[in-house]
Amino acid sequence: MNAPLILLHEEALRMSHPVFAAAPQGTRSIFVWDDTYFQQLPHSLKRLIFIYETLCEMPIDIVHATPLDAVQHFAPSMLYIPTTHSPPLVRMIDALRAHVPITLVTDEPFVTLNKPTDARRFFQYWKKAEKTAFLHNGGAHA
């Protein structure tokens, strides 16, 4: 096994994500560009260009492979991955667990809601969420 590795995904494309603080200083960061994965998503060409251009602005290596091939190539001692609720990303993370230890790193909340809300309708959700959406830590009290 080699050094630890940060595996970034498209839901965490910023250097201020807590995954960078959770991993040991100097940990290599990669983004796996998997054509098969992206073909399964409803991303437009504009969205893919946005992801690519964002990655080009970050000190991160873009690896053209499958996640499993990339992990087997780097053989990290620990894989740090931002937490996600995206079913395709959760399946990918679950598949990688059989090959390498994984630490999932949770992001700060975007919003903090005091009571449950019906998330099926965006407008109803947003009317409750907009008050804290852009506050530090989603408006949660420490």
Image (cartoon, grey):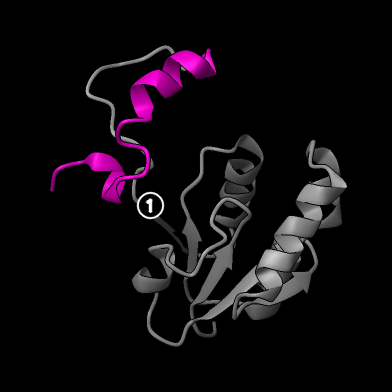
Q: In the image, is residue 131 part of the stretch drawn in magenta?
A: yes
Q: Looking at the picture, tell me which residue is in the foreground, 3 or 119.
A: 119
Q: Residue drawn 36% across and 44% down?
A: 134
Q: Is residue 93 above or below residue 114?
A: below
Of the residues shown, which amino acid type is indicated by label 1?
Thr
Residue that mark 1 sits on? 106
Image location of residue 46, percent across then percent down? 82, 49
Q: Residue furthest left?
A: 142
Q: Looking at the picture, tell me which residue is in the foreground, 19 or 1.
A: 19
Q: Identify the element where label 1 is drawn.
A: loop
Q: Residue drawn 72% across and 73% down?
A: 62
- Quadrant of the drawing holding the N terminus: bottom right
Instruction: Decide if residue 31 is on the left or right side of residue 12.
Output: right
Q: Looking at the picture, tell me which residue is in the foreground, 115 or 76.
A: 115
Splitting the image into 4 quarters, where does residue 116 fall? top left
Q: Residues within 10 Å of mark 1 (few under 14, many from 20)?
A: some
The magenta region covers: 120-142
Splitting the image into 4 quarters, where does residue 90 fall? top right
